[in-house]
Image: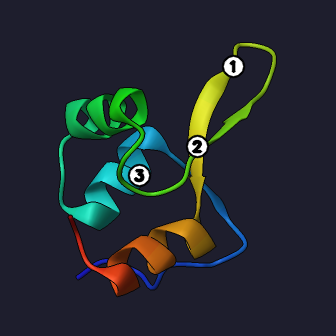
Amino acid sequence: MTAPIDPRRLYTTSEAAELLNSAERTLRRWRTQDTGPRWSRYGTALRYGYFGIDILAYLKEGRR
């Protein structure tokens, strides 16, 4: 069982994939197709992350 999702935390792509029970590759594809949970860019290396609130909203809406 995974820990509860903290709405204020920024999750990495791998952490978000685990929470969503999806592959990292799927989340990368969703970003290019503008689907899936809302994502953010951060850092000087322009990494991608997902805030817990956005993951929770996506799960509440249901997967499409």
Distance, label 1 to label 2, CA atoms, is: 10 Å
Please name the residue shown 44% across and 57% down the image: 37
Which quadrant of the rendered structure holds the C terminus? bottom left
Left or right, 47 with reference to 59 = right
Distance, label 3 to label 2, CA atoms, is: 9 Å
Task: First in sequence, mark 3 or 2: give its number.
Answer: 3
Which quadrant of the rendered structure holds the N terminus? bottom left
Which residue in the structure is indicated by mark 2? Answer: 49
Q: Quadrant of residue 10?
A: bottom right
In this rendering, the answer to whether 11 lies above or below 56 is above
Classed neighbour count for the residue bearing mark 3: other residues with Cα under 10 Å, few (<14), some (14–19), many (≥20): some
Secondary structure of residue under mark 2: strand
Left or right, 10 with reference to 55 = right
Circle 3: residue type: Glu
Q: Is residue 30 or residue 52 the one in the foreground?
A: 30
Query: Of the numbered discs in the image, which one, if any, rests on residue 64?
Result: none
Secondary structure of residue under mark 3: helix
Rendering coords of residue 29 (x, y %): 28, 30
Q: Quadrant of residue 40?
A: top right
Circle 2: residue type: Gly
Which residue in the structure is indicated by mark 1? Answer: 46
Circle 1: residue type: Leu
Of tags 3 and 2, the one toward the viewer is 2
Of tags 3 and 1, the one toward the viewer is 1
Count of residue discs: 3
Secondary structure of residue under mark 1: loop
Left or right, 45 with reference to 2 = right
Left or right, 13 with reference to 48 = left
In this rendering, the answer to whether 16 lies above or below 55 is above
